[in-house]
Amino acid sequence: MIVFVTVGSTRFDALIEAAISEPVLTTLRDLGYARLILQRGNSIIEPEESNRESCYSIQRYGVDIEIWKFKPSIQAEFEQADLIISHAGSGTILDVLRLGKPLVVVPNPTLLDNHQEELASALQTLGHLKATSIQNLASTIASFEPRDLVPFPPFDGSKFSNLIDEEMGNMKPVKSVTVVDDPQVHEDQYVHAVYDQIASHFSSTRYKVRTTVSSNLYRFNRALQPWPIIAKFLSDLPTGWIGLDSGAGNGKYLPLPADRPGCILTIGLDRSRNLLQIAQHAGSEPGRLITREVVWGDVLGSGWRSGVFDYAISIATIHHLASHGRRKLAVQRLLQAVSPDHGRVLIYVWAIEQDELSKRSIPTSDSDGSSPHTTGEDVFVPWVMSRQHKQDTPVVPTSVAETPVYNRYYHMFANGELKQLAVQAAEEFGLVIGPRGNVYDEGCRGIEIVQEGWERSNYYVELRRWVS
């Protein structure tokens, strides 16, 4: 029989170490499990294994063990496993339960909050899985009886849709728009004013996860798992580095990295005072108030000393700027803010190409779809205020109705447009494009495009500054 252990994209050293410990392996062997597949994510395995390649096999206590970090999909491992041991990530739990597989869940006690434990406990109470701790993993496996589990109810897509509609309002169509007035005036009306008005509702939808189990509705307010590339970028930064989140919003990324809290300091900047009030205490819990460093300002401003930061991130911000020139200036401000010798920059913007999870359909000038998009599209993306929320400041919405609707301006980027914008901004900033090398004169300054691509309806680019 096969057991599959997974920690997703997180770092959970304790679970990985426990899975290959003598008590757990001997218990599995005695129960008839001959093979263990271990997906370790960003976890670090004991020193003697740390220098091995990313995928390798070992044998311990009569169990064949296959160890690797990531795969594009772990669906095959779920399907072939006779037992699954997992962290308490909600996505993993739901995937496994829908397959009807026996599941033992081990919440990670080192995360910023304890909602993993709440989720695991709630599902255990309903009989759908077995929750345990690192210390009790071996004994839980020994006493676990899969036949006693209550089958998980089949997925009802209409219930999920109703939850989204309740929280976000019925999704309104995205509309094309032409910026005819001054870009600053356009942004003031359709970006800055709107986010100050919807700040609390906007923040709640970024932190709220609802899980429907049988007829019960469980609410868990927690920071959403960051996107893998953003999480890895922040996790890989050296201890002691200081950085800027330009357009920090509600401060979702200020507490990161989750696996090394406090090892770096990210200062949040945003134009919305109402969002900054939320960001100032991002990651706080009842009885434990945390105060973050946040600054009220504009992403186009130059209030920082040049090169003062080690890194900068701009997540879902530059697409709110209403002209090519202003978007280019925003990139230049990021390059200006980081160290010319080692500064790193990560930028995310919304893409014309939306994935299957997005309810948005982006109107384009190429109506027949016969050619790839080469330039982005200016659009209004409506925000529907939930009935449970009221605006943070008195406003007149775009539609005077029982449920207010606010139009937010976006420039939806085309494939290759973000990279081209970064290159143009850097060249006009006097930087050479390419990796650091010996072919340049001493003192030459440049940037390297470390990576670029598309992730979850967004385009991203990572830049690294250098001096020869």
Image: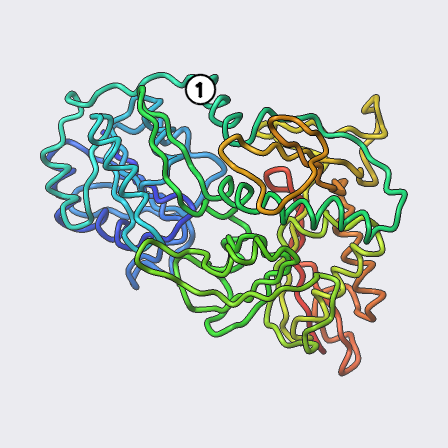
The quarter holding residue 325 reads bottom right
The quarter holding residue 91 reads top left
**Drawn side of residue 34 relative to residue 205, left or right:** left
Residue 104, x across and y down, in percent: 23, 35
Task: Tell me the quadrant of the picture where the C terminus can be found.
Answer: bottom right
Indicate the amino acid at tag 1. Answer: Lys
Considering depth in this image, is 47 or 332 the residue closer to the camera?
332
Disc 1: CA contacts within 10 A as few (<14), some (14-19) or many (>=20): few
| Residue located at (78% from left, 64% from top) | 433
Residue 441, relative to residue 245: is it above or below? below
Residue 116, x across and y down, in percent: 31, 43
| Residue located at (78% from left, 77% from top) | 444
Work out which residue is located at the far front of the displayed protein and give it: 394
| Residue located at (36% from left, 43% from top) | 39
**Drawn side of residue 364 relative to residue 112, left or right:** right
| Residue located at (23% from left, 37% from top) | 121
Coloring scheme used? rainbow
Question: Which secondary structure lies at badge 1?
Answer: helix
**Drawn side of residue 27 relative to residue 154, left or right:** left
Residue 415, x across and y down, in percent: 75, 41
Task: Tell me the quadrant of the picture where the N terminus can be found.
Answer: top left
Considering depth in this image, is 262 or 421 the residue closer to the camera?
262
Residue 403, relative to residue 240: is it above or below? above
**Residue placed under numbered mark 1 in the picture:** 159
